[in-house]
Amino acid sequence: PASRLVLVGTAVSRFAVEPVPEDTVLIHGELDDVVPLAAVLEWARGHQAPVTVIPGADHFFHRRLTAIKRIVLRAWGQPVPAASELPLHLRDDLLDIRELVEAKAAEVAATRATQADREQLQRIFDRLDASFGGDDLEAQIECDLAFHMAIIDATRDPALRKVGDAIIQLMYGHIRKNLSGLTPNHKRRATLREQHRTLFEAIMRHDPAAAASAAGDHMAYVRAEGKLPLAGQEAAKCP
């Protein structure tokens, strides 16, 4: 028999699911349209089973496999691999590409986003804003990624989606490093929170120029602040 159990996207509304051990890891996507989250929560409520919800994830957890891995490792008390450090030249090249992609995505999303896209973006932004009001780094990282990917998805542009998906997922470790250094500093965390809001509001009011500008400002800030020492480290002093 299995010594540990992980259930991901469990089809409780389609099949009979037996009671599970109390240490079972239950993971579900917020936007699962095959097995609604509400059905899983109702089943879990009757079994006293906690459920971990991944914001913005669908039934197939597209672009969320890394998040699932980290949830399981933490639940099992296993070390979560540290974000791999990209070589400086590669990191800067990827930041250049990401800056172009995000500015263009924000501009296009402000023009093309459907009502459904805007409702999705509103839900994810609300979660992002709430996460930056606390100290849960994992929630901030997941919500930050979901927010930027939701903007790219709202462009309805296949090319932007492919490039954005590849670049942002490749830079997942770099985003984690940035936030781990930025968020412990309340002033910098407040700045990031305000930048997210400015970007979000520009898209929602159909202002492509302002959205592109806000995305560019945000990326410039992340680039600059990401070069500062992380919390608890001292900056090198010039002799």
Image: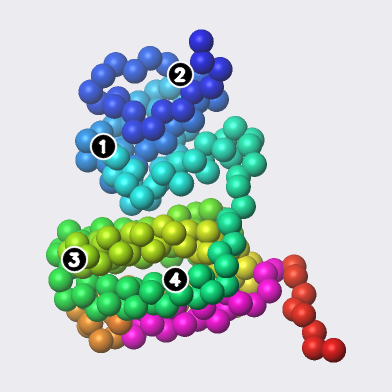
**Of discs 3 and 1, which sits in the foreground?**
3
Residue bearing the label numbered 1: 36
Check if mark 1's residue and mark 4's residue have beta carbons within 8 Å: no
**Of discs 1 and 4, which sits in the foreground?**
4
Chain-order first, disc 2 or disc 1: 2
**Residue 180: percent from left, percent from top:** 60, 63
Residue bearing the label numbered 3: 157
Q: Is residue 238 above or below residue 133?
A: below
**Residue 162 visible to the viewer:** yes
Q: Main secondary structure of the magenta part?
A: helix
Chain-order first, disc 3 or disc 2: 2
The quadrant holding residue 120 is bottom left
Callout 3 amino acid: Asp
Asked which secondary structure carries label 1, the reply is loop
Q: Is residue 161 left or right of residue 55?
A: left
**Of discs 4 and 2, which sits in the foreground?**
4
Callout 2 amino acid: Val
Q: Is residue 139 left or right of residue 111?
A: right
Chain-order first, disc 1 or disc 4: 1
Callout 1 amino acid: Pro
